[in-house]
Image: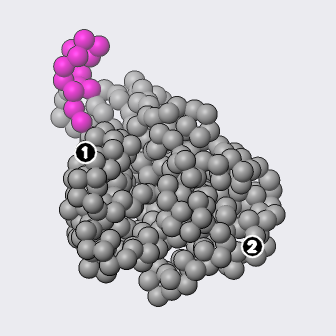
Amino acid sequence: MTDRPTTAEIRDARAGLAGIARQTPVQRSETLSRLAGRPTYLKAENLQRTGSFKVRGAVTKLSSLDQAERAVGVIAASAGNHGQAVAWAASEVGVRSTVFMPVNAAFAKIDATRDYGADVVLAGELLDDSLVAARARAEETGAVIVHPFDDPVVVAGQGTLGLELADQLPEIGTIVIPVGGGGLASGVALALGEARPAVKLVGVQADRCAPYAGGIVFGPTIADGIAVKQPGALTRPILDERLDDVVTVSDEDIAEAIVLLLERAKLVVEGAGAAGVAALLAGKVPGDGPVCVILSGGNIDASLLTEVTRYALTRGGRHLVVRTRVADRPGQLGQLLTRLAAEGVNVLEVTHEREGMDLPMGDTGIGLILLTRGEDHCRELLAAMTDWGYPVGRVT
């Protein structure tokens, strides 16, 4: 295979994946089409085997190994999705796999990688650190490195997603792709270079880790799947040539996109997978014609999903967090809660505070988390509580 895969090699990879990788669905989202002001489609790669597009490249790479290479096993470094894909692909063909992961990788991804059959080694704070440790182990053992993005065979496998899109959406004008190391984006770009050369390709990075977009080289982000210090030596030139634009999005916008996809599209998507939707809703994707967003993965830790949901609901005015006070006498809190119930409010949480320099003698501080109908309802409730005589402050 050449330094960068050809379209013919990507087609061969697609043939090799038949009956193994799923052809994931593309669905039009009426909600997103309305919010974005243009026809919007979602490529649900979060429904792929092992929960992300990574299985395409992993299976293609494992299939290319000869018997001697399979006998010594494979080694990978991953924040989660690539590791799960390599572990699953290796187990399917009876090859031993070892996956190096950052020490702060999501527990769900670590457990899943082990469950798929890999020996997991936690090494370093970042994916780049795990890659260094993985290379050192490979030199010691002779095992084959399955790189997450800087490998032409892996890129060919990821490019099969582009061929699918060319068949599924012949009328599409723009495709939005999350960019970390660049394996998916470069594979899709190469696949569409011949099949759909007029399609615009927009890459998305988290603004807390956006080296390709000229931003921060590394910072913690909920989009851990694209938190890579630099695109690869193979992928960077392809991205430079083929991407029409690269934009960044905030973790806050990604969180809202995750919740919107959960509520309106009934799709569980991780931070990296939701980055494209976040960019679209933030008005950062150029053009006004049909657009397809690649939901690259759905492997989000349940605890993070809970945190993200609470944050997004609060930011969107669906959760109202307030502090007030009532007289420290029987029935006073019940009176407040009865009034709130009459306004159609569900009280999610109540806390008492009886100490504090700003708390008058004889009063009890009250913290409330209220489930509301939206921002207008929040403003109405704050005004009502003030009218009722309760000093109220919104916690943001």
For the point 35% across and 48% down, which residue is it? 131
User: Circle 2 is placed at which residue position?
Assistant: 195
Identified by mark 2, the residue type is: Ala
Position of 170 with respect to 20 (left or right) is: right
Position of 279 with respect to 303 (left or right) is: right
User: Circle 1 is placed at which residue position?
Assistant: 123
On screen, 314 above or below 302? above
Q: Nearer the viewer, residue 267 or 343?
A: 267
In the rendered structure, which segment of residues is drawn in magenta? Answer: 351-365
The numbered disc on residue 111 is none
Q: Secondary structure at mark 1?
A: loop
Q: Nearer the viewer, residue 327 or 269?
A: 269
Is residue 337 visible in the rendered image? The answer is: no
State the quadrant of the N terminus: bottom right
On screen, 360 above or below 62? above
Q: Secondary structure at mark 2?
A: helix
Position of 106 with respect to 386 (left or right) is: left
For the point 78% across and 73% down, which residue is it? 171
On screen, 395 above or below 357? below
Q: CA distance from mark 2 to mark 1?
A: 41 Å
For the point 59% across and 64% down, which residue is it? 2
10 Å neighbourhood of mark 1: few (<14), some, or many (≥20)? many
Identified by mark 1, the residue type is: Ala
Residue 90 placement (x, y as % from top left): 31, 73
On screen, 104 above or below 6? above
